[in-house]
Amino acid sequence: MTVPVGTDSLTLLTDRLQSLRSERAALMAETLIESSGDVADRATNVEASIRLQLLDERIAGLELEIVESRRREHVSGVVSLGDVVTLDLGDGDETYLVGSVEQAFAGVDTITPLSPLGRAIVGAEVGTTVSFQPRPGVTMTATIRAVGETLAA
């Protein structure tokens, strides 16, 4: 999935937050069924409680990320979290969003800032060629072609 024209990082994060909240509400509706029955029935409730806790953690993390993205000051021509970046990884230009795991979950072509490539490009300027190791013993390069352009629909 690619990001629709005009969609920014904050909108993607907000949409993902709404999706997670809807998922949580549906899970809550499932778990409100009276807790009676045998051990197997109660085990299902335990599993739902664990899923609920994991969703709550993801929602909390995403809320913090939204707050941080609203505070962040962008420097033109320098790759930062939330930017759309065009890279040449050796096979021509490819466009990605430098973003969170939540955006990757949403199906957006995303480079997370803590990945080897993300660590290499965040803070680098347009025109720079960076090296990174996707796995031990393998070194690759990426040239930053553009920052801040909108992904195509």
Image (cartoon, rainbow, N blue to C red):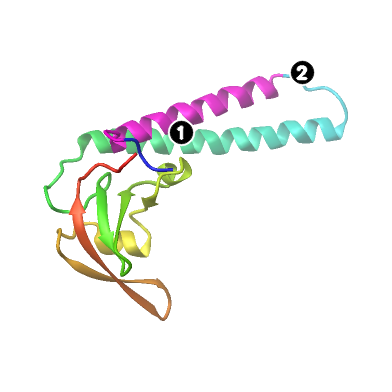
Q: Amino acid at mark 2?
A: Glu
Q: Is residue 40 left or right of residue 20?
A: right
Q: For residue 153, which quarter of the picture?
A: top left
Residue ID for mark 2: 34
Q: Is residue 128 left or right of residue 96?
A: left
Q: Is residue 85 above or below residue 34?
A: below
Which residue range is magenta in the image? 5-32
Q: Nearer the viewer, mark 2 or mark 1?
A: 1
Q: Amino acid at mark 1?
A: Ile
In magenta stretch: residue 12: yes
Q: Is residue 23 left or right of residue 126?
A: right
**Residue at image coords 40%, 36%:** 62
Dot 2: what SS?
loop
The label number, if any, that marks residue 59 in the structure image: 1
Q: For residue 54, which quarter of the picture?
A: top right
**Residue at image coords 82%, 30%:** 41
Dot 1: what SS?
helix
In front: 96, or 23? 96
